[in-house]
Image (cartoon, rainbow, N blue to C red):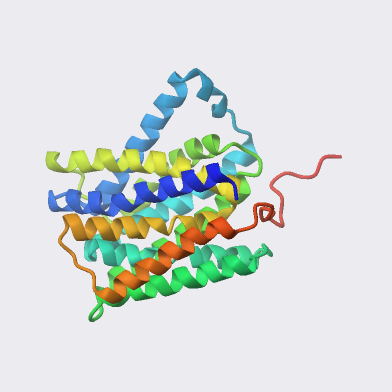
Amino acid sequence: MEWQGILVALFSAILLGGAPILAKWAYRAGADPTAVVILRTGLAALVLWALYLIHPRWRRYLYIYPVGLLGCLAVGFTNALGSVFYYLGLYRLDAAVAHLIYSMYPILVAAMGRLNGDPIPGLTRLRILLASLGLVLLLGRLQGMPDPFGVLLVLLSSGFYALHVVLSQRVLYEMPAQTLTLYALTAMAAFTPVAGWVFGNPHPAVPSGAMGPIFAMAAVLMLSRLGMFVGVKRLGGTQTALLTVMEILVTVALAVGWLGERLMPIQWAGASLVILSILLVLRESPHAPLPRWRMPLLPPAD
């Protein structure tokens, strides 16, 4: 496999695993969930633009062609909807519970890719099975049904996140990951307030005690999206999604250590299966072709 893609995908997962914990801190400080997601997305986009404009080597990534911009808008729009649904659901659920449900998205990514005709090797299917069983065992902590509306919101978020991974894989055939990160995050920052006001009706005032976690969430979003898009470009959507299952282990560990949640033995077994699924990437063929989208964004050259 491509080692740089593997490392940046795992880096992205580790960062994303801390996001729910930071959000819970912001909620405890009195912040509204929709205001949190709007602020962290806007801050991430502003900082990213500043970095691209200041750094000479990154200015070249500002160039984008019209059809590619439309692709970035689609990626940003689906990600914005997923983010709003996730943080609204997280407000109603425990951090570990919400992220366990959300982390079913690798299965959805694989299913969407298969509908598009992408090949799924036998070892990849085994890894999907192991990750799915591990998540089911981790969900053993649910004794009784949590808030049904919160569960529905997180499930919708998982679906939109999977769709955004699949769309980003197609867009990355024609542009660098750095360009997609900038414009997709900008589109996300533009769409998130609209989705937030429609679905969440946020309160504009944010307590000062919540700003620290929100700034940290913005940094996590910026760096994790860059890492995730690099991983998708080098590995494909399904392989990147399977590697980013690592984020659920980070979330659970932080929830246990900082939020006082506890795991049962069966859940540790589930975590072991997830880790095994990730380690099996070492056995994947290094020559496996990246999946190709059936409908090209650009017409073939004459």
Quadrant in the rendering for residue 253: bottom left
Q: Residue furthest bottom?
A: 144
Location of residue 38 in the rendering, given as x and y in whole percent from the top left corner: 31, 45
Q: Is residue 268 left or right of residue 207?
A: right
Q: Is residue 100 left or right of residue 263?
A: right
Q: Nearer the viewer, residue 40 or 195?
A: 40
Q: Can residue 73 be seen by looking at this rendering? A: no
Residue 121 pos. (x, y %): 64, 66
Residue 45 drawn above or below residue 166: above
- Number of numbered discs overlaid on the protein picture: 0
Question: Measuring 69% from the left and 52% from the top, which residue is drawn there?
Answer: 287
Residue occupying image coordinates x 36% and y 71%: 270
Instruction: Answer above or below: position of 10 versus 98.
Output: above
Residue 168 in sight from this viewpoint: yes
Left or right? Give the position of 295 relative to 176: right
The residue lying at 22 percent from left, 59 percent from top is: 255
Q: Going 67% across and 62% down the picture, which residue do you hit?
A: 118
Give coordinates of residue 224: x percent, y percent: 41, 44
The x and y percentages for residue 108 are 51, 66
Q: Quadrant of the C terminus?
A: top right
